Image: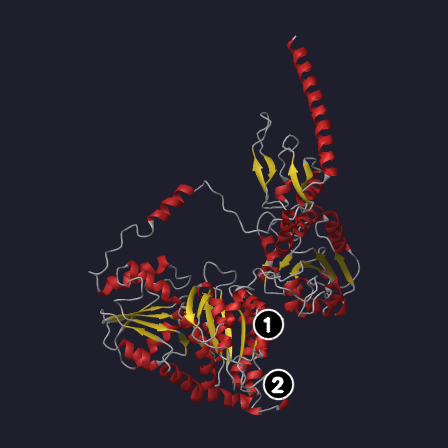
Amino acid sequence: MAERSFKEEVKSLRLGAGQEFHGEGILAITKALLESGVSYVGGYQGAPISHLMDVLADAEDVLESLGVHFESSASEATAAAMLAASVNYPLRGAVTFKSTVGTNVASDALANLASGGVTGGALIIVGEDYGEGSSIMQERSHAFAMKSQIWLMDPRPNLPKIVDCVRKGFELSEASNTPVMLEVRIRTCHVTGQFTASNNIRPGFTLKDALDNPVRDTNRIVLPPASYLHEKEKLEVRWPAATRFIREHQLNEFFDGDLADIGIVMQGGMYNTTLRALELAGLADPFGNSRVPLYVLNVTYPLVDEEFLAFTQGKKAILIVEEGAPDYIEQSVSTLLRRHDIQTKIHGKDLLPMGGEYTGLVLKAGVGAFIRTYHPALVAPAPLNSGDNRLKSALAALDGQVHGRPPSFCTGCPERPIFTAMKLVERELGTHHVACDIGCHLFSILPPFNIGATTMGYGLGGASASAFNIKGENKASKRAISIMGDGGFWHNGLLSSVGNAVFNKSDNVMIIVDNGYSAATGGQDILSSHHKHDTRSTQNSIEKAVRGVGVEWVKTLTRTYDLKAMMRTLKEALTSTEPGPKVIVAQSECMLNKQRRERPLVNKAIQDGKRVVRDKFGVDPDTCTGDHSCIRLSGCPSLTLAPNPNPLRREPVTKVINSCVGCGHCGEVSHAAVLCPSFYKASVINNPDNKDTFKQRWRQRVIGLLQRRHARRLALTAAGQAS
C-alpha cells in the first residue's frame, strides 16, 4: 500500500498521438518512457522520486500491454545493475532512485556501467533531494556524473521540456554509448502542466530476443586491459560524440534579450526561479520574455565549449546560477574562457551563496546585485535593511510566542512504544550507546526520546555499532544497541548489519522495527509485508532470515504496544549471558497505512448502517495530577495540555484530542511510569443496536443516581459547616 494511489492518473498513459496530456512531472516522465520504446524499468523509492515508483506500480497493466518489464528493486544498486541488459543489446532501459544517497548505494554498478559503456539507451532518473525540503545530507549528483563520465541532464521545469529530455536522453545515450542521468529536482517532480502526447511504442528489440540470441563482448567488461581502453574511449570518442549530439539537437536553450552586453547561465532546474527573480526586478514578464539573454543548461555535464564561447562573445559579464557546492560549472567556464583569452567577467558564487537552496528570495538578491553592477539605472538599490520586511515582522511577532515542534512519529505509531520502553529500561540499567538507522525510527533522536548517537546509512544501524563489540579483559559492562527498520533490513541490513554481527561474534543488541512496509518512503510493500500481494512475494519472515544467517538469540514481539513485554524483552537482551548477537524483532503495522486501509471501510460500514465500534482514550481532568509522564514518554500528537479544572491546582492537565486512533500507548506509558489512574478507554458506537441502546440508558440512570446522591452529600456537608 503506497502513500498515494495513481490508479486514475495512469489512465492518461494510454493517450495517443495528438491528444493533450495533463498532469504532474512524475506522470509525464512515465509517459515519456513509454513513448521512447523502453524495454525495462526498475528502481527503489525515496524522496522526491517515490511517486514515480508508485506510478509505475499502478501502471503495471499498461507496461505489460507494451511488453515492458517492471521491477520494484531491492535497492538502488539492484536497480542500477539492471542496466547491464543495455550493455550488449539494443534495449532501452531506465531506473530511478533518490540522489545522492541512492546514487551512493548504486555507485559501484554505475561506475562499471559507465566504464564499459552501453549499446541500448540507459537512463538513470535521479530525484535530486537537495534544499530545505530535503531529508538527507546536502550533496549533488553532479560529482557522480563527473567522476564516472555519465552525462547529466537537468531539464527546465516545464512538461514539454521534461518529456523531450527523456526522449533525447535515450538518443544521447545511444549516440555516445554512455549512460545518461536525468536529474529531477523536487519542484520538477511535482510541477503540473500539459503537452501533446505521442503514441506509446513497443520495443522493436525485446528482452526475449536478447535471451534467444545472446551476445557477449569482452571489450565491454571492466577487466584489464579493456578497462584502460575504456578511459581512452570516454575521452576521445564518447565525450566528443555527446557534445556533438547536444549541440546538433539543441538540448540546451538560448533566450535572447535586448541587454546584450550581459547574460545569465543557469542549470535547467533553476530556470523558473531565475525568471521569477528577473520578473521581480522588472526585467522579465510572467510569460518568460527576459530582457537579459539566458543560456539554459538542460545538460549540465558535459558542457559544450562552442556554445559557451558563442554566448559570452561580446558580453561584459555573465552570471552563473549554479545551486549547491562546489561550483563545478563556474570553475569549468572560467578555465574555458581563460584558455581562449576571452575577458568576459564571470560572476556566480561571489553574488550568490556558495551552498544552500536557491529560493526566490536568494535569487532575487543575487540577480539584483548582478544587474546593479552593470546596469544600475535598471534596478533600484537595495534598502539597507534588505529582505522581505513582512516576513521579518511576522517572525518578530511570533518570537517567544510559538515553540518550535520537532518532527515526530505519527499518531498511534507502533514505533513509539519501542523507544518509550528504552527510556524506561534506561532508568534501571543506565544509558547505552544507541546507533540509529535511516527510517521513521530516526525521529527517536529528537524530543521527547532523545535516543541515538549516529546514523550511517540505510540498513547500516547494526554495522555502525560494530566497533563497540569489545572482547576479552577490556569488555564493557554495557552492550551497544542498534536500531534498524524492516525496509533497511531488506535493503542492506541482512548482510551488512546482521550477517556482519554473526561473523564477528558480536555481543550487542539489535532491534529490527517491523511495521510491514517501507514506511518512511511512502508505505511501499517489502518482502516481509504481512498481507498477500498479487504480483510480489511478501509474508517472508524477518526472524527466519535472521536465523538463516546464524543468529541464535532472536525474540519476536508481535505487538509493540505491549509496553511491559517490550521492556522485559529489552532487559533480557541487555543482560543475557548467551554469546552472540541479540536480535529483537518488534512487530506492529504502520498506523498510517493501517488507517488508510481501514478508515474507508469503517466509513462505508457506517454509511451502510452497520454497527461499528471504535476505541478512543481520554483523561479524567479531575484525576490527572499534571505529572505529564504520558507526554514525556510518548510524545503522541494527540496529547496536549488543558487548563486544570481544580482552582487550587496550577499545573495544566493532559487532554486527548480527536486525532486519537485508540492505540492505547499513552495509558500504557502512564501505568508503566507512575501507575496513573486518570486514563480511560471509551467505545464510540455508530449505528448502535437495541442492546447498545438499552445498556446506554441503564448506565445513564445509574450514573445519574450516583451523581444526585453525591450532590446531596455535598449539600449536607456544606450545610453542616455553615451551622
Task: Say which quadrant the N terminus sits in.
Answer: bottom right
Q: What residue type is labelled 2?
A: Lys
Tell me residue 447's x, y (percent).
58, 48
Instruction: Name the side, left or right, on which 616 lies relative to 317.
Output: right
Residue 398 locus on image (x, y percent)? 42, 42
State the residue position of label 2.
Answer: 208
Whether 256 is drawn above or below 512: the answer is below
Residue 140 shows in this picture: no
- Residue under the image location 63 percent in, 48 percent down: 607
Residue type at mark 1: give it. Answer: Asp
Q: Is residue 318 visible?
A: yes
Residue 42 placement: quadrant: bottom right
Mark 2 residue crowding within 10 angstroms, few (<14) / some (14–19) / many (20+):
few
State the residue at coordinates (62%, 38%).
Answer: 628
- SS of the residue under disc 2: helix
Q: Looking at the image, is mark 1 or mark 2 earlier in the sequence?
A: 1
Residue found at the far left of this picture: 377
What's the CA distance linking mark 1 and mark 2? 19 Å
How far across and down, in percent of the image, does residue 326 sit? 42, 69
Quarter of the figure with residue 680: top right
Q: Residue 61 carries which label?
A: 1
